[in-house]
Amino acid sequence: MTTVPWDTAFDEVLRTSLPLLKSGEELLPGTPLSEYGLDSMGMMQLIARLEASHGVSFPPGTMPSGAFANPGVLWGMVQAAQQAGEWQGDGAVRRRPVRGRRRSGLAGWSEHGSQETAVGASWQL
């Protein structure tokens, strides 16, 4: 069995959102989610489940449809939300942007006006 980069909660939530994925079937980072029955309604439900299970928030308009291409990309979005300070779970981490940067959802603008993702942005506790 292949080791995956995500946690058990993510795996369980994702599996419940894929009606065509057979029980026990391997779910890899590059598995195309649409081939396993994830449609637009399923995406909305999956967002709500991930917000609840991982304590993240994906405000409307911050989840591009490409985020649902495969589990690897989707897990990256969950991690980006956690690293950007969106995490509000039991071990809540509150982060703030480094001075000179402003944050907008999962994307931010650098002080020079260029767009960068939350993963590439500088954040500090």
Image: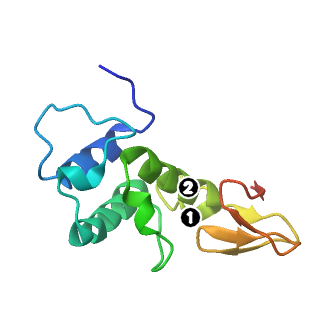
Task: Identify the residue at horizontal 66%, vertical 54% (top origin).
Answer: 119
| Residue furthest to the bottom | 60
Task: Identify the residue at horizontal 40%, vertical 31% (top origin).
Answer: 4
- 99 up-or-down from 118: above or below: below
Q: What is the basis of the colouring in this image?
A: rainbow
Q: Secondary structure at mark 1?
A: helix
Q: Which residue is mark 2?
A: 82
Q: Which residue is mark 1?
A: 86
Q: Secondary structure at mark 2?
A: helix
Task: Identify the residue at horizontal 62%, vertical 61% (top origin).
Answer: 85
Q: Position of residue 82 (x, y in %)?
A: 55, 55
Q: Quadrant of the N terminus?
A: top left
- 112 or 105: nearer the eye? 112
- 9 or 46: nearer the eye? 46
Q: Position of residue 39 (x, y in %)?
A: 22, 66
Residues tagged 2 and 1 counted as in contact (Cβ below 8 A): yes
- 9 up-or-down from 124: above or below: above
Q: Position of residue 50 (x, y in %)?
A: 36, 59
Left or right of 49 in this view: 94: right
Q: Position of residue 61 (x, y in %)?
A: 48, 79
Local packing at callout 1 (Cα closer than 10 Å; few below 14, some 14-19, many 20+) is many
For residue 1, the mark is none
Left or right of 103 in this view: 89: left
User: What's the residue type where badge 2 is placed?
Assistant: Gln
- 57 up-or-down from 36: above or below: below
Q: Quadrant of residue 66?
A: bottom left
Local packing at callout 2 (Cα closer than 10 Å; few below 14, some 14-19, many 20+) is many
- 80 or 116: nearer the eye? 116
Spatial separation of the CA atoms under disc 2 and disc 1: 5 Å
User: What's the residue type where badge 1 is placed?
Assistant: Glu
